[in-house]
Image (cartoon, rainbow, N blue to C red):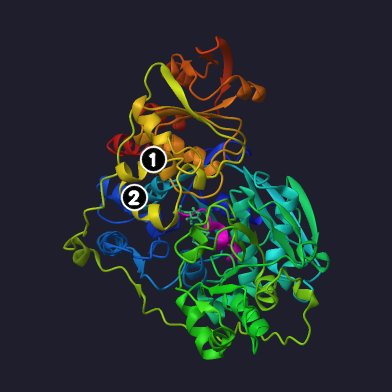
Amino acid sequence: MGLTAAEKILKEHIVAGNFNKGEEIGIRIDQTLTQDATGTMVYLQFEAMNIPRIRTELSVSYVDHNTLQTDFRNADDHRFLQSAAKKYGLYFSRPGNGICHQVHLERFGIPGKTLLGSDSHTPTGGGLGSLAIGAGGLDIAVALAGGPFYITYPRIVGVHLTGELQDMCSAKDIILTLLKRETVKGGVGKIYEYTGPGVKNLSVPQRATITNMGAELGATTSLFPSDEVTREFLALQKRENVWQPLSADPDARYDRVIEINLDKIVPMAACPHMPDNVVEVCSLAGKKVDQIAIGSCTNSSITDLGIAADILKDKTVAENVSVGISPGTKQVLDTAVVTGIYHNFVSAGARILETACGPCIGMGFAPNSGAVSLRTFNRNFKGRSGTADASVYLVSPETAAASAVSGVITDPRTLSGIELKDYSEAVVINDNMIIPPVPEEVAAGVEVLRGPNIKPCPLGKKVGDDINAKVLIKAEDNITTDHIMPAGAKILPLRSNIPEISKHVFEAVDPHFYDKAVKYNGGIIVGGDNYGQGSSREHAALAPMYLGVKAVITKSFARIHKANLINFGIVPFTFTNPEDYDTVSEGDDLSIPDVPKTLKEGGAVIMENRSNGKKIPLSYSLDGRQVDILLGGGLLNYTKVNSGK
Ligand code: MIC
Ligand code: SF4
């Protein structure tokens, strides 16, 4: 039987386990990427492994999230990351060079390679035909040390594309359409692989918009084939030499096939506060807008900015709207300058922000109270913009720019007289903000520079015999890691300091969470379906671990967060009967007996709710390696012990 494109890459990289669906496999990682908000922990963890130099083919440390620098802390992190990159043999992409996923796509991604990144949108690289997966920082540290990355062999969903996008309809509208159909948890345990005659009608940046937002489906990753379009993109990047073809065999079998006719795609918008709350833009037409933000790793290519600039050309942004543009990379910004795109923005009254994540993660450009903010980004979780009561709608650059001119939500198909130019060939290449690795002899003499806010990564504790603890919080369905461990300008600078950042766990949901965790010396978190969706930030597991959280019991978990909990020694249980969720309340005293023995032997877990006497069966889906990690006090301890053998 033939293989899908994803299976071909998996097969070529498998180093542990059997090639059977649903079983855990270990794959070799060729490339890694980190960004600064998760990266400091990665290199502290790598340092703790005592390995002199990275063992991947290529690894890049990017600085793109924490660039606000309101005090010394962000800048100290940058200095730490730059010196650690030099010491351990990584490329370093300096602040200002751009958002990790976009820079990686342009300058480093290679079809057929595996890429592991400490950011959930790493699958952006799937637009170029690489198998790119987001993971917690500790998994990246292990990959840097040459260890395999473990995933459950995913189900592969074929997305069969036919037709061609119509004017003013975009790749963003394709992925929003898919999110409407599949929902934010529809992709858990799956790879979305794009096939069919419509694929050739999408450019690499368009494909990357789609694979980027595959993260919002909860998918393990998304993948496009590598074809002539890919070759042309790489040729423009002067990297044609790394091109190689990749496609599914004609008789490849998919677990499910979804048909999408691109001719039928229309402008879509994800309404507050979930990326799958999708409607047609025309149904929102006329709604007053306060803010528009164009950029992020989803829609900040030169094509995206070019479209917006062509729509804004010779116009002025509406009086009631503040428009912010954050170019994805230095290459995009440079190209925007030489092509006149930048001039169109400035002359229309748009505010040009830094080449970084910026407003996407609440690092400045927060909207006004109660604002309607249209963003070309990928997440619209409540409060993520920095304004708790803002309503964020996710839209395409076409819709964003059309609405910037009118001041109300506008279906871009209603515009007339717009001439859209093709800027894709005007690429300005200049890698002077990427510092390459130095030879090992030089690296040996490099000192890793720390600041006072950079504290060591705490180690997990072994799981005790019985877990007797209080329910600290009972959370709903679809809790995001932004709920668990908020980001934004105030909290992001604490990413290198776990004791400090721990004070903010669940802050926006329950301001007393930290005090309760301290008072009861830890506890248990109870959650609903798809608990921990969204980002890869391991701080959403690391900080609860630091506060003494011993177990998280939910109806179901998002992939990366579950892996992060295991990595830090917190046991992820699910309710065997989801309705038992209703029998547990905040403050209840729960008792889970004989945890290590039960996990080891694979026996049944019956939890007692001592507050109401109910006996509740719990399930766990953990293989032997994961049980060993949990019982050994987390992955860092486990790796130290096992690499010492
Ligand atoms: C995000 O978009 O939520 C982030 C910020 O990029 C995170 C990583 C982080 O929290 O540092 C992600 O997507 O993984
Ligand atoms: Fe940065 Fe936003 Fe992309 Fe996360 S989603 S990497 S914060 S641009």
Q: Nearer the viewer, residue 610 or 369?
A: 369
Report x, y in % for residue 505: 42, 41
- Residue 131 visible from this viewpoint: yes
| Disc 1 crowd, CA 10 A, few/some/many (<14, 14-19, 20+) | many
State which quadrant residue 485 falls in: top left
Dot label at residue 41: 2
The reply to whether discs 1 and 2 touch (Cβ–Cβ < 8 Å) is yes
Residue named by callout 1: 542
**Residue range of the region highlighted in magenta in the rendering:** 116-129
- Is 584 one of the magenta-colored residues? no
Does the magenta segment cover residue 126? yes
* Residue at x 80% of width, y 76% of height: 414
Up the image or down, 553 lies above or below 410; here it is above
Picture quarter with the C terminus: top left
Q: Residue at x 25, y 61 (%)?
A: 87
Helix, strand or loop under label 2: helix
Mark 2 neighbour density, 10 Å: few (under 14) some (14–19) many (20 or more):
many
Q: In the shown orientation, is residue 500 left or right of residue 446?
A: right
